[in-house]
Image: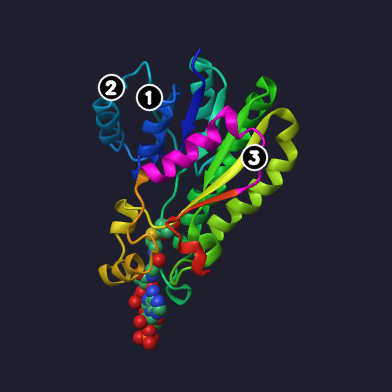
Amino acid sequence: MKKIALVTGGVGGIGTGISRALAKEGFFVVANYVVPGSETRWQEAMAAEGYDHTHCMPAFGDVSDFAAAGQMVSAIEATHGSVSVLVNCAGITRDASLRKMAPEQWHAVINTNLNSVFNVTRHVLDGMCEQGFGRIISISSINATKGAFGQTNYAAAKSGILGFTKALALEVIKKGVTVNAVSPGFIDTDMTRAMREDVRNEIVASIPAGRMGYPDDIANAVVFLASEASSYITGTNLSVNGGVHLYQ
Ligand code: CAA
């Protein structure tokens, strides 16, 4: 039977790349989404690679809400069995300097980017421990450790993921469950395309690799951490950023 991989925010730019890569590795991929209709583009992208409902499915659910996340996980597990790989990829930006930041912008980012990691992990962890295998991979960011003007909310959430990763890694390694983070740099997706053009151009000029990353650059790292081959790696943060962290 295929192992189940759940990717929160799985229909987004990086999420779609991760979904495709995990399906290619033989996982049954469940891509979570919250905006009705946003799963269509993902379904088309998966179908284009030959992946139909026997390989993957979208799953609606607001992962910023604990109960909703639980309902989604229960529905998936009732039909397909325990989740073996969880990729916490749901993320948004609400950039503003702190002096201009509204409480809604703070809470939206903390809820979606950080609280979702607790909300979903809490619901899949027992199943992973019982089956003696699990991979929890959370998508953090270069801006967790580097900071970015206008991203106090985002940097706080993404740094929170790094602390969560280390603490949980200690709790479950003896159960065959590893917990790691992947920190993308600047990846060519709708999120980075939404940045002001001058800010974006300045960032691209500063990347040692000379280009933005592709979603597949992140997906390849996730596939490795999801594999049996990575069983001795836990509590780590894998930087995938074309060398940007070297300037930190
Ligand atoms: N760096 C330095 N100074 C900046 C600045 C920046 N990025 N942005 C604004 N400032 C300056 C302004 O020029 C202004 O200076 P003066 O008072 O001397 O005129 C001062 O700071 C006050 O700034 P404001 O609060 O008025 O800022 P703003 O409203 O003009 O811009 C912002 C705020 C839109 C958030 C802008 O700073 C910005 O676009 N920042 C980048 C955010 C960013 O990095 N987003 C990444 C998105 S991609 C992602 O998040 C994925 C990932 O994981 C990497």
Residue located beneath label 1 in the image: 57
Q: Are marks 2 and 1 in contact (CB under 8 Å)?
A: no
| Position above or below: 1 against 13 | above
Residue at the location (44% across, 56% down)?
241
Asked whether residue 126 appears in the rendered view, the answer is yes
Depicted 116 relative to depicted 92: above or below: above
What's the CA distance linking mark 2 and mark 1?
A: 13 Å
Say what amino acid the circle numbered 1 marks: Met
Q: Please identify the residue farthest to the front as the structure is shown.
A: 209
Identify the mark at residue 226; answer none if there is no mark.
none
Q: Position of residue 228 (x, y in %)?
A: 59, 27
> According to the image, label 3 marks what residue?
233
- Which of the two residues, 66 or 187, is positioned nearer the viewer here? 187
First of labels 3, 1 by sequence position: 1
Task: Identify residue type, mark 2.
Answer: Gly
The mark total stands at 3
The residue located at (75%, 31%) in the rendering is 174
Query: Residue at point 34% right, 56% down?
Result: 212
Q: Which residues are magenta?
A: 216-236
- Judging by the rendered image, the residue that carries numbered circle 2 is 50
Tell whether label 1 touches label 3 (CB within 8 Å): no
| Residue 115 sits above or below residue 86 on the image | below
- Residue 52 belongs to magenta span: no
